[in-house]
Amino acid sequence: MHKHFYPIGARVPEDGGGLHEVQLRMLGAIRELPGLAVADLAGALGITSQHALYHLRSLSSQGLIRLDRRGIRLRCYPEERPASTSDEEPPKSR
């Protein structure tokens, strides 16, 4: 169990402290433009590349994105979501 601390007056996330607002914005951008470079993403969000990489590594460890080095650039790709098997009907026996 983790304790989450927030500054006085800060908006507490409704999901109990799941993804950070920056991470949600990153996920949206990566899903819109797969293969986006970390430096470009950071510039678009108005944060440093180091700050972006911190959050991207967290998203990667949660299995939400994949980081891939292409030459000297580190690029971000959304991870494919596994198909839900609960919606499928079981095969009928003959």
Image (spheres, rainbow, N blue to C red):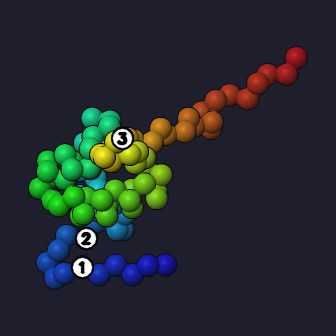
Please tell me which residue is depicted at 14% across the width and 78% down the height of the picture.
9
Q: Which residue is mark 2?
A: 12
Cα separation, mark 2 vs mark 1, equals: 7 Å
Question: Helix, strand or loop at disc 3?
Answer: strand
Local packing at callout 1 (Cα closer than 10 Å; few below 14, some 14-19, many 20+) is: few
Question: Helix, strand or loop at disc 2?
Answer: loop
Q: Position of residue 81 (x, y in %)?
A: 49, 40
Going by the numbered disc 3, the residue's amino acid type is Arg
* For residue 60, above or below residue 80: below
Residue 82 located left or right of residue 42: right
Please tell me which residue is depicted at 56% across the width and 35% down the height of the picture.
83
Q: Position of residue 82 (x, y in %)?
A: 55, 39
Sequence-earlier tag: 2 or 3:
2
Q: Which residue is mark 1?
A: 6
* For residue 92, above or below residue 74: above
Sequence-earlier tag: 1 or 3:
1
Cα separation, mark 2 vs mark 3, equals: 37 Å
Sequence-earlier tag: 2 or 1:
1
Going by the numbered disc 1, the residue's amino acid type is Tyr
Q: Is residue 15 visible?
A: no
Q: Which residue is mark 3?
A: 70
Extreme residue in the front direction: 71
Residue depth check, mark 2 versus mark 1: number of the one nearer the observer? 1
Q: Position of residue 3 (x, y in %)?
A: 39, 81
